Image: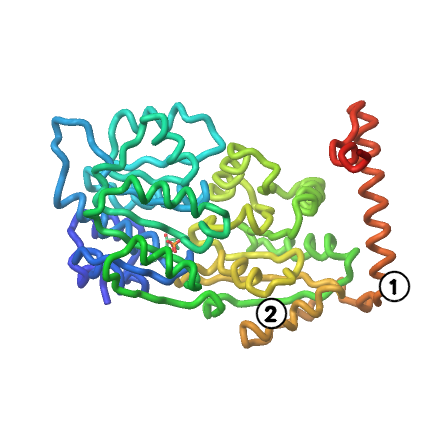
Amino acid sequence: MKFEDLKIIPSILKALRDENYTEPTSIQAKSIPLILNREDVLGSAQTGTGKTAAFAIPILQHLFNDPQNPQGKRKILSLVVTPTRELAIQIGESFSIYGKYTHVKNTVVFGGVTQGSQTNALWQGVDVLVATPGRLLDLMDQGFISLQDVKYFVLDEADRMLDMGFIHDIRKILAKLPKERQSLFFSATMPQNILNLSQQILINPKKVAVDPAFSTAETIQQYLYTTNRDTKKDLLLHILKDSDLKQVLLFSRTKHGADRITSNLRKKKIECAAIHGDKSQNQRQKALQEFKDGKIRVLVATDIAARGIDIDKLRYVVNYDIPNESETYVHRIGRCGRAREEGISISICEPEENLYIRDIEKLIKQKIQIVNDNPFPQTDKPMNAAEKKEREKEKEKQKQAFFANRNKKNGSQNPNFRRNKR
Ligand code: AMP
């Protein structure tokens, strides 16, 4: 199938050609005709399937065919609500890219930054608003945003939205939307609470489903290095000697770990940056942009920080540790090889993580290929219960020493310890 077969207008087709999109993905082929036909849609699809274009293209087409009065200030005709800032920015960029030959204007609002530039853009008038729930409600309360003209409403990543505790915010937003509207609802998973929410939003929806979350994209080649705990960092440097690895998204389970990896890589003059919850929104945005622009070779991310980030044509994902939840592995490697691009995932496994690999292989129903050309092979055995306990104790000691040292430097006590003492 071709995009031309979906009755898409020439100005959007031209933008898609600029992006080298030749064929619609499955979710696009299924959803675009329904949305153009003004049906409500209940879409079961995760990021990486092309779902943003699946809703952005037909909404742009509706807005192109029914333009606003050029004399007056534009009203918000379409609202897209999504859980994270990264996703909001990417959706806004998608509207700009697919709509670059239309007159449709969009803007994005999200929390964690000052609101001035967001309210300025709103003041000038936009057709499409992409928003995270908290900032949206805040700006609505302050009178910067009215939803009374919204005709096309998208709730994106609904399951994650509920996981993040946004249900009350969503209810408040829904209460302000006009009853007469077209609604599109997307979620990676469809448990009962999500279906219940969808019923409050959609009217006679058409259901569209693609790739359930538990299938590993067939285009991703998966490799496994087994090594010892204390040789991981040397093995990583060995892997990065391969100059093919020009742009690598590397996962670390913890923020500390991410910082440690970045500082080790920097010592070896490998350009890298970390994104995690302790970094400001601006730092994260800057790191992501530099990574996309090829200025940074390795982006080190925790699972939460990497959620939903979309790097066009990313080829390499490295798991510096093996997640104990197999679904996390699937989500991690799904960052590369998106929308039919080829992707390669490399996992580095220490003895304690051998068990996790077995669980992952059960979930994905395939064996991950072990790399034998490995100068740091695994020689240690997994710890027994007593050794594990000993290590936990050692870690706790190190943590206490870290805080004690920091408090001495700052001349203050860790508030957690103070609370414990009372
Ligand atoms: P999404 O699921 O919306 O996060 O999209 C995943 C990635 O696929 C993005 O990088 C898009 O630019 C890309 N993409 C979306 N649709 C297509 C298509 N029809 N052909 C090629 N790439 C696409």
Instruction: Tell me: residue 411, above or below residue 394.
Output: above
Would you place residue 32 above or below residue 146 in this image? below
Q: Amino acid at mark 1?
A: Ala
Quadrant hosting ligand 1: bottom left
The picture quadrant where one finds residue 264 is top right
Residue found 21% across the figure and 38% down from its top: 149
Q: Quadrant of residue 42?
A: bottom left
Q: Which mark is residue 250?
A: none
Indicate the position of residue 233 as horizontal and vertical percent values: 73, 52
Q: Residue 34, relative to residue 306: is it above or below?
A: below
How far is the residue under mark 2 from the one under mark 1? 26 Å
Question: Circle 1 sits on which residue?
Answer: 386
Q: Secondary structure at mark 1?
A: helix
Considering depth in this image, is 418 or 222 the residue closer to the camera? 418
Q: Residue at x 21, y 52 (%)?
A: 13
Q: Is mark 1 within 8 Å of ligand 1?
A: no
Task: Kindly identify the residue that appears in the image at 53 percent across and 38 percent down.
Answer: 284
352 or 75: nearer the eye? Answer: 75
Mark 2 or 1, nearer chain start: 2
Q: In this rendered view, identify the residue nearer to me: 160 or 49.
A: 160
From the viewer's perspective, is residue 232 above or below residue 301? below
Query: Where is mark 2, residue-wise?
Result: 360
Which residue is painted at 65% across and 69% down in the image? 357
User: Where is residue 157 drawn, in percent x and y?
Assistant: 41, 53
* Residue 341 in view in this figure: yes
Q: Position of residue 396 (x, y in %)?
A: 82, 47
- Is label 2 in a helix, a strand or a loop? helix
Q: Is residue 383 left or right of residue 131?
A: right
**Label 2 is placed on what type of residue?**
Ile
User: Residue 65 occupies which quadrant of the picture?
Assistant: top left
Residue 190 at what x, y percent from top left? 41, 63
